[in-house]
Amino acid sequence: MLKHYWKTAIRNLLRSKLFTSINAIGLSVSLAIFLALSGYVQYQFSYDKFYEHGDQIYRIDYYEYQEGEPVLQSAQTHDRTAFLIHEYIPQVEAIARIYFEKAYVFTEDIRLTDQYMFFADSSFFKVFPVKLLSGAPETALEAPRTVVISKSQATVYFGDENPMGKTLYFNERLPFTVTGVFEDLPENSSLEYDFLLSWSTLYFYGWIAREGTFEYPWTYTFVKLHDNITDVQAVNQQLTKLANDHITTLVNRRHTARQELRPYENLHLATPLSGEIKPGVNPVLLYSLISMAIFILVAAWINYINLSLARSLERADEIGVRKVFGASRIIISGQFLLEALILSTGAFVIGFTLFYLFTRPWSSVLFSDVTIAFPNLTRTTLYFFTFIIATALVAFYPAHVISRYKPVMILNNKLGNSKGKGNVLQQALLVFQLFLSIAIVGITLIAARQIDFMQKFDTGFNASQTISVRAPASTNSDSLRLSRYRAFRNEVLQHPAFRSGTSSMNIPGEEIRFHDEAVHPVGSTNEKKQSFWVMWIDEGYQETFGLNLLAGRNFNPEERGLTCLINETAARALGFDNPADAINTNLINQDDKTVTIVGLWQDYHHQSLRKPMEPVIFYYHHPHEYGYYSFRANVQQGDYMQALEKIYARHYPNDNFNYYFLDRFFAAQYQSDQLFARLLTLFSVISISVACLGLLGMATLAMVKRTKEIGVRKVLGASVWNILVLLSKNYIRLILISCVFAFPVCYYLTEQWLNGFAYQIDIKWWMIVIPGLLVLMATLLTISTQSIRAAMANPAKTLRDQ
């Protein structure tokens, strides 16, 4: 008996090739998208979850306020905070401070730049249980000039030799002895590093005070709480008390401070603060993507219901004969459920194969630059049974409806005239499907407009034809560093391909490294003393980046350390209603040095439009460690990059030539938004395609039901146009109902997303209406083939066949 039903199920699926293909394509493609997006979301949520007792690790964040308004929100704290934590907070088991750099690391044979390194406390391994392959965690970072390196970098620098006790050189040939090797960190880590340098090295070279200071926050402080501590809020209150008790400059600035713990395992998904080591991801994006993937899968299941009901009318005779010969509702339902089981199994195999192809060998086609967690055998098995069971549950409704057909109605050909709850539910499902399509298309359109707006927005500087080269690390402590740079720049500018050049600590597209909370005008009664960002530049910055000087003048190299330039926002923050009035006034900075404002630049967007315009003070100071040398090029002058590299090699033979095209560097800030837009576009196409497949099934069902009616109308004189309007008006009504629900949802969701940008587009009415029109056009095109065929049919033949 089972063999008979199995053969019948296979035969029925093969006989109805159109419906089987539509269902198989819809289910398999939707499943592939769901697997890909759930894998991406799973990977993002897996960040920092690999440490044992990782839920006890926290970072201390620092906030400053003036009259309740935030003036500084930083991922970094003051380095002295660590010395006082145990006094205030006995709940803390261990403390570790970190200072992040990208370093030039080399031996006599291997030279690599931009290596991720931390200066770390000797207690680092008490907070982060990194697996050491060599060395003792208690002592590896105690002595000055010692370093613990990753296994992969040990291989890079020392090959198969034992790295313990060997020497690595950092930046300006500072020697460090290897005292340990640790297992490589997973890629899904918010703290990315290959080298851990001992914190005591900072004391050794006199770069910081041994007991720390509360001058400004510059270090990342991590703590590990005792096992039984659950009241994090109590710890936060004590951290805040510590800050307000000991940061004496707060009173002078009329500020208050707050410190709080941020769970280490949440760093990747939390709201970013200034100074973050590695950019995270917005969890709203992740929830949006997985929601859309689920919606598309649901839309495919809705198609299955509609297509199954449509197909049931073609099989009415079969059902009637089965019932006449005594087949029960359970038997008939079981037949349809068996077909659903076979179809869903095939769809899962096809969908999983598509997922594998587009996330492994063909990953660059759809998911370039995206890491997707591939499910293991257990998760794959779980997905398989969940998909099969869900499809079976979905198939239960049409099986239940079909099994209720009465033989007398089937054999008298009155089935197509039935109306009732089933028809209402069917239309409701189609409305929901169209609602999803319209909403997704609307969100896609607005997101694309916002990203296009950001890319074309006048940032206030010129990034085109500008090349930024990493400044040499080997000359960080060289007293001749500035004169070496000037000789290098002069030779570059003698080449006809280059028009101007500058040195700067940071370049547009990168967060400014320094800030100053103590700046105020000399003799001013202004009480708005907030945090100012501080840039180190030279006199070439204005011409190279095309900044607009509104008042005053540019730097004079002879006045190094005595003058500064500011932007408009900084002038207003200093209390000048008319920014130009700031020219020739004096400032006192946090080092108690007096400098004169000699120029005012028009505001420019140093970072993405997600961030508001911030006050920036520009000092004439040559950069070290992280600096850049930037040049404006004339691209018509041959191979200018090769010329620049040769000149760089002559002046800095010990450093690698690392460069960036500034326009691409700046645009990289929008990479996550562009990914979001690409995925939304993909979703829109798939969503409309799946909806159209469902409409094709609905149209087919309608044609079968109304074949006799159409024949009668044609006999009575109805034209083909009249028939098309008759068959289409119901779908137009359903689309209008879908729009009523989709438009407000689309507006609300996109408005919430746009709130994450300081500069954003205005949502216009047509951005909401166009998606409805697009879905309407796709709907009419989809049903037109079936409608035209029904309208053009010979009424004599259709009436004879009824």
Image: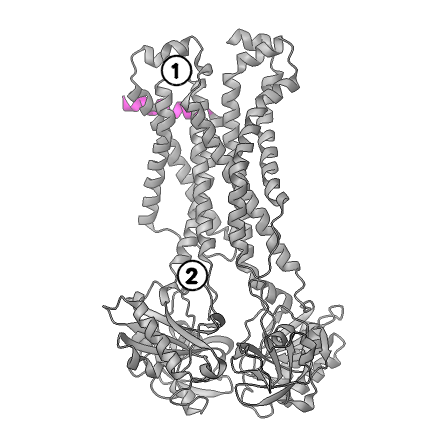
In this rendering, would 429 be left or right of 83? right
For label 1, the SS is: helix
In this rendering, would 225 be left or right of 357? left
Q: Nearer the viewer, residue 613 or 96?
A: 613
Q: Nearer the viewer, residue 758 or 337?
A: 758
- Which percent across, then down, holds residue 199? 39, 84
**Residue 122 makes an appearance in the image:** no
Q: Nearer the viewer, residue 208 or 515?
A: 515
For discs 1 and 2, the disc positioned in front in the rendered view = 2
Distance from Cα at disc 1 to Cα at disc 2: 56 Å
Q: Residue furthest front?
A: 525
Numbered mark located on residue 318 in the image? 1
| Residue occupying the point 40% across, 35% down | 346
Which range of residues does the magenta coloring cover?
1-16
**Pointer 2 residue:** 269
Place residue 549 in its image quadrant: bottom right
